[in-house]
């Protein structure tokens, strides 16, 4: 979903407010699923960009998640992911905390 958001924003005009209508459409289409509010779509985009956008060779996100380190990212709760990417400066540092979170079943204190 993060890749789709980034791609759609590339095709949108600056300041078009792309995420708000997308949020409304997703909430209308999937009323029983939570998490499609505007702010969370921004976090989804940020998460995607942190882990995947700066890759030299762009691959599908699913293919990249086959990498053992990145596959750990999807093993921890979404809120933990947000805390980690908001405080880390690199993927290596973030993946360290992801691994520690899995080992200790909690977010490490930075």
Image (tube, grey):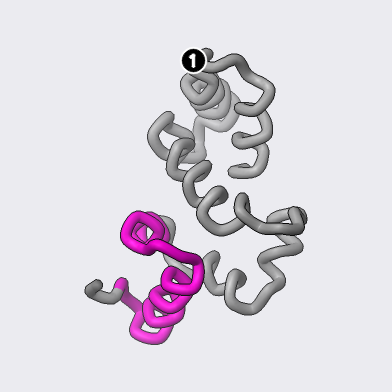
Residue of label 1: 15
* Residue extending farthest bottom: 103
Position of residue 39 measured from the top left corner of the image (x, y, whole percent): 38, 34
**Of 63 and 92, the residue lying toward us:** 92
Q: Quadrant of the C terminus?
A: bottom left
Q: Is residue 31 above or below residue 52?
A: above
Could you tell me what secondary structure mostly forms the magenta stretch?
Answer: helix
* Residue extending farthest front: 56
Pointer 1: residues within 10 angstroms few (<14), some, or many (20+)? few
Q: Is residue 61 above or below residue 96?
A: above
Question: Which residue: 56% across, 28% down?
Answer: 26
Q: Is residue 43 above or below residue 16?
A: below
Residue 45 is left or right of residue 55, and the answer is left
Question: Which residue: 28% across, 76% down?
Answer: 108
Position of residue 13 measured from the top left corner of the image (x, y, whole percent): 60, 15
Residue 109 is left or right of residue 24, and the answer is left
Question: Which residue: 54% across, 65% down?
Answer: 74
**Of 62 and 34, the residue lying toward us:** 62
Q: Is residue 4 above or below residue 63?
A: above
Tell me where residue 100 sits by quadrant. Answer: bottom left
Q: Is residue 24 magenta?
A: no
Position of residue 44 measured from the top left corner of the image (x, y, whole percent): 50, 44
Q: Quadrant of the N terminus?
A: top right
Question: Which residue: 49% across, 15% down?
Answer: 15
- Residue extent of the magenta highlight: 79-107
Tell me where residue 7 sits by quadrant. Answer: top right
Residue 97 is left or right of residue 63, and the answer is left
Residue 8 is left or right of residue 44, and the answer is right
């Amino acid at each position: 979903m993060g890749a789709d958001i980034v791609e759609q924003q590339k095709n949108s005009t600056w300041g078009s407010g792309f995420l708000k209508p997308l949020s409304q459409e997703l909430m209308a289409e999937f009323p029983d699923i939570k998490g499609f509010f505007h702010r969370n779509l921004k976090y989804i985009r940020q998460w995607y960009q942190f882990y995947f956008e700066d890759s030299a060779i762009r691959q599908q996100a699913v293919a990249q998640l086959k990498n053992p380190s990145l596959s750990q990212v999807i093993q921890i709760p979404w809120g933990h992911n947000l805390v980690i990417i908001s405080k880390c400066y690199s993927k290596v540092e973030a993946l360290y905390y992801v691994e520690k979170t899995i080992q200790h079943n909690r977010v490490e204190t930075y």
